[in-house]
Amino acid sequence: ILDVVKVDAGVWNTRKTVQLTLKSGEFVPTREGVSDLSIDGDVCRFTYEGDTNALIALLSLADIADLRITPQGLEQSFLQYYGTEGEK
């Protein structure tokens, strides 16, 4: 028996991977849409799903030296949507 789930095409394009390096201070992004947060020294990485303007407003709170925002690839989106084998 197969379970078929219709996936909205927009799901694959809304998630972004954000990586930023801080010039100074601390930044812990707490907002709806932020997940998979990791902080290692002055580098902060997280996944964001939501309105881009809200993301820009959130990032404006940090003193940023370097910023990279990339759309998630198909494989990352697939794994995030369906989970990995070990999570079932």
Image (tube, rainbow, N blue to C red):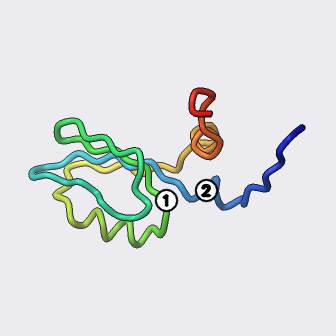
Q: Residue at x 58, y 27 (%)?
A: 86
- Of 63 and 31, nearer the camera is 31
Q: Residue at x 57, y 43 (%)?
A: 80
Tell me the amino acid under the disc marked 1. Glu
Where does label 1 land, which residue? 49
- Kindly give the residue lying farthest to the top in the view shown: 86
Q: Quadrant of the C terminus?
A: top right
Q: Residue at x 47, y 69 (%)?
A: 51
Across and down, in percent, residue 56 comes to: 35, 67
- Kindly give the residue lying farthest to the right in the view shown: 1
Q: Quadrant of the N terminus?
A: top right
Q: Quadrant of residue 33?
A: bottom left
Q: Which mark is residue 13?
A: 2
Across and down, in percent, residue 52 comes to: 45, 67
Give the Cα separation between the discs numbered 2 and 1.
Answer: 9 Å
- Of 66 and 15, nearer the camera is 15
Q: Which mark is residue 36?
A: none
In what element is the residue under mark 1?
A: strand
Residue 73's place in the image compared with 27, above or below, is above
- Of 64 and 76, nearer the camera is 76
Quick check: 9 left or right of 16?
right
Q: Mark 2 or 1 closer to N-term?
A: 2
Residue 38's place in the image compared with 56, above or below, is above
Q: Residue at x 18, y 48 (%)?
A: 22
Tell me the amino acid under the disc marked 2. Asn
